Amino acid sequence: IKVLDARFVTTAVEPKGYPTDHTAEVAFVGRSNVGKSSMINALTGRRKLVRVSNTPGRTRTLNFFDVDLERGGVRHQIRLADLPGYGFAKASKADKAQWEKMITTYLEKRHRLEAVVSIVDVEVGPTPDDLTTLDYLQAHNRRVLVVATKVDRLTKARRKPRLVELSKLMDLPLEVILPFSSTEKLGVEEVWGALLDTFGK
Ligand code: GDP
């Protein structure tokens, strides 16, 4: 799989700001600081497509990116939607309610949303917010791929057993949980492959 191009499209809060819904889209969700920005940069092979923020919870908008890919001589265009991270400590009740509305509105309106990538920290495992989000996605029949990031922090021998633990904690088949490391660029091919394979199913 080769990334031919990746570019920022737009930022939005409300549906009227969303880009047109004509391209197969994949949304990325996770608690803030889980490594979401780093993952999107690693997947697209661009160091600064998404700013890796040191201030958890700063991204309060939906950010859209277009990626041109090639696999086996076939070109694909995928739109990525970077959803604001949840679960940051300083959020007020009002902030949380606003976040929830932004996310649920997005997830309910997007017809070309083919899959949602739920990012978890392989060491931390799913947080209560992650589990709530998973339940919500499943209740709305969204296809979910879990990407367990920061696997570079585990010894190689610990990785597979930890993924098995995560699949039990999240009550999901092992096949939908993929290991990833942005720092070691591990899992890039597998995540793109899994996403492309789910399209249109
Ligand atoms: P976001 O808030 O979810 O977008 O998270 P960031 O991408 O900004 O990353 C949060 C922190 O985790 C930063 O200090 C990153 O350097 C670190 N980080 C992100 N991905 C990885 C990874 O794959 N391995 C390791 N060891 N650290 C990572």
Image: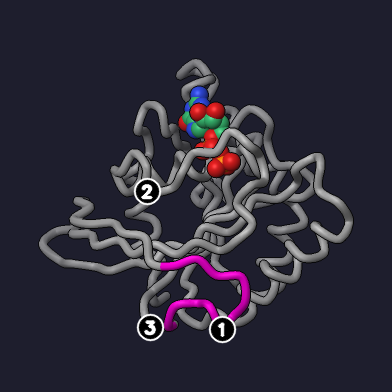
Within 10 Å of disc 1 (Cα), the crowding (few <14, some 14-19, many 20+) is few
Front: mark 3 or 1: 1
Q: Visible in this render: residue 14?
A: yes
Magenta part of the protein: which range?
A: 10-20
Q: Marks 3 and 1, Cα distance to the nearest angstrom?
A: 15 Å
Q: Which amino acid type is shown beneath numbered disc 2? A: Leu
Q: Contact, CB < 8 Å: mark 1 with mark 2?
A: no
Q: Which mark is residue 22?
A: 3
Q: Which amino acid type is shown beneath numbered disc 3? A: His
Q: Can you give x and y, in whole percent of width and height, for residue 5 in the image?
A: 22, 57
Q: Nearer the viewer, residue 102 or 29?
A: 102
Kind of element beneath mark 2: loop
Q: Can you give x and y, in whole percent of width and height, for residue 173 in the image?
A: 58, 51
Q: Visible in this render: residue 160?
A: no
Q: Which residue is mark 2?
A: 49
Kind of element beneath mark 3: loop
Query: Mark 3 or mark 1, which has the lower sequence index?
Result: 1
Within 10 Å of disc 3 (Cα), the crowding (few <14, some 14-19, many 20+) is few
Q: Residue at x 35, y 33 (%)?
A: 185
Q: From the viewer's perspective, tell me whether residue 171 is left or right of residue 26.
A: right
Q: Marks 3 and 2, Cα distance to the nearest angstrom?
A: 22 Å
Q: Which residue is mark 1?
A: 16
Q: Nearer the viewer, residue 176 or 74?
A: 74
Residue 40 in the image: above or below residue 115: above
Q: From the viewer's perspective, tell me whether residue 44 is left or right of residue 142.
A: left
Quadrant containing the C terminus is bottom left
